[in-house]
Image: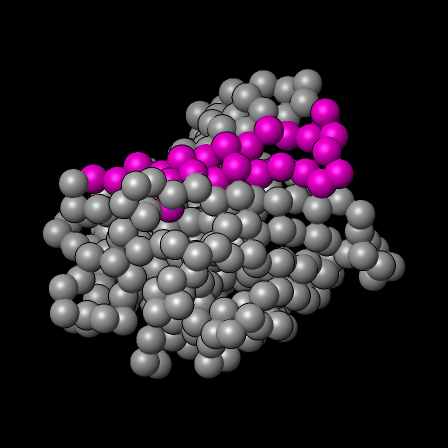
Amino acid sequence: MIHVLRGLLYGMVVFQFTGCGDHLFPNVSPGSVPDRLRIKTVTQELADVVGRSGLVQYISTFGYDLQGRLNTITTTQNPSDPNAPVETGAFTYNAQNQVTQFQREITPAGESKITETYSYTYVNSQMTRLYYTNDKDGRGDNVWDLTFQYNPDNTVKHSHKSFATGGVSYTEDSDYTFTGNNLTLVATATSIFRIPSPLNNSYTTNFTHDSKTNPFYNVAVIPAPYATAGVSTPFNGILDFYTYYGGVDNVLHLSRNNVLSAGSTTYAYTYVGDLPATRITTEPFKPQETLTYVYESY
């Protein structure tokens, strides 16, 4: 998992760059364009505390519109359980085929429905702001506000991330270094402003990559299941929020190739052709996660 990468949500959300073949066009499905394969399902399984494989799997199923754009994600549990959360998410696009919103509705058993929303603002072809909200526990302060600056080649140069709640505010500024089409370093400075004095911190995260295709390169956000990741709740001091790709804290979608390491977090893959078949994530003090990718032709 990638909780150390709190600086950037989104850098290049399915932009439509003309004359730039390295970027996904928004009407291309996540997967492999040359092989005409796209993601059908991603299944998560977490190891238990002694390292044995868990019995519960969470299956995210992907739906596409008539233009081939990713438009829905539905998450279910295997084996099925009437107490498992019901999760459905939908993408909205503008006339330029840019993602303007991803909204997920989650209904935990015996609890009120939670609505989670990612809203994207553009200036021409560049996504300049991402505004994240959710209404868990009826609160109005589960909010992240991010702004972005870009290099001349349209890679992300800098991001600013913030929230404020209950007399406490938090800011995070990150600078990004790319080598070719892969993100190789993020330098981050954080500040928590509170009485009697602010708390400042800084750190860097280095990345390595394989030579295979990242199926979610430039896709805005792929959420992890609510049952294992929840939703972001910065008001209670939890500043990290896990997703599979993109979103509030995860930058794995910014690299054309698959990330092998991000700081102390490592990723091991098996492959089907040029695409990942499985990904095993190992992070200190976290249960090992296995993702299984299934593709379909289109």
Q: Was residue 19 drawn as part of the magenta stretch in this picture? A: no
Q: Is residue 189 above or below residue 101?
A: below
Q: Which residues are magenta?
A: 70-94
Q: Please tell me in which quadrant of the rendered image residue 291 appears.
A: bottom right
Q: Is residue 149 visible?
A: yes
Q: Please tell me in which quadrant of the rendered image residue 21 appears.
A: bottom left
Q: Is residue 284 above or below residue 106?
A: below
Furthest-right residue in this view: 50
As rendered, which of 49 and 237 lies closer to the eye? 49
- In the shown orientation, is residue 97 left or right of residue 31? left
Q: Is residue 252 above or below residue 39?
A: below
On the image, the x and y values in percent for residue 86 come to 59, 29
Q: Quadrant of the N terminus?
A: bottom right
Q: Quadrant of the C terminus?
A: bottom left
On the image, the x and y values in percent for residue 146 come to 33, 48
Secondary structure, magenta segment, majority class? strand
**Looking at the image, which residue is at 51% across and 74% down?**
273
Q: Please tell me in which quadrant of the rendered image residue 63 appears.
A: top left
**Looking at the image, which residue is at 27% across and 66% down?**
23
**Looking at the image, which residue is at 27% across and 71% down?**
22
As rendered, which of 266 and 145 lies closer to the eye? 266
As rendered, which of 129 and 37 lies closer to the eye? 37
On the image, the x and y values in percent for residue 195 come to 49, 42
Q: Is residue 174 visible?
A: no
Q: How is the image coloured?
A: one colour
